[in-house]
Amino acid sequence: MSTFLDDLQKAISAHDLEALVSCFTEDYRCDTPTHPARSFVGQEVVRSNWAGLFARVPDIEARVLRAVEDGDIIWSEWEMSGTTVDGTPQLMRGVVIVRTEGDRASQANFYLDPVD
């Protein structure tokens, strides 16, 4: 597994917000083609989004199920699970296609959604 994926998975599962944010460039761009209004730019938005997720799902765990690297592009299949603070189980699955600069993400196409 790539250093980026390994670092990100560990940061999510450890609920280490600073380590997670450091996995992304300052001008990171997240594109969500199936939900365009959710797309954003910036490391600070990563921080805000994940701080909220860690607060809502304090036991979240992340698993990379499969990954393929092609130069600076990483295709990865993820599963994230946990329980919300109100006791509701959460399960998300999907694919994230990341462009890296060194060991940090600079752009991603994000297709991770809740499982019905």
Image (spheres, grey):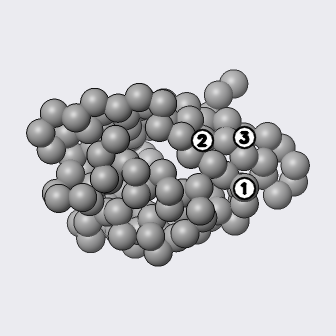
Q: Are marks 3 and 2 in contact (CB under 8 Å)?
A: yes
Disc 3 crowd rating (10 Å Cα; few below 14, some 14-19, many 20+) is some
Q: Along the line of sight, which residue is nearer the eye, 97 or 6?
A: 6
Q: In the rendered view, would you say 75 is above or below 1?
A: above
- Mark before the other along the chain sequence, 3 or 2: 2
Disc 1 crowd rating (10 Å Cα; few below 14, some 14-19, many 20+) is some
Element type at mark 2: strand
| Viewer can see residue 78 | yes
Element type at mark 3: strand
Q: In the rendered view, would you say 21 is above or below 94?
A: below
Image quadrant in which the C terminus is located = top right
Amino acid type at mark 3: Gln
Q: How many marks on residues?
A: 3
Give the residue displayed 34% in from the left and 41% down from the top. 1
| Viewer can see residue 39 | no
Disc 2 crowd rating (10 Å Cα; few below 14, some 14-19, many 20+) is many
Give the residue displayed 44% in from the left and 70% down from the top. 19
Direction right: furthest residue = 87
Q: Quadrant of residue 113?
A: top right
Residue underneath mark 3 = 90
- Mark before the other along the chain sequence, 3 or 1: 1
- Mark before the other along the chain sequence, 2 or 1: 1
**Quick check: 19 left or right of 75?**
right
Distance Cα–Cα, label 2 vs label 1: 10 Å
Residue underneath mark 1 = 59
Amino acid type at mark 1: Asp
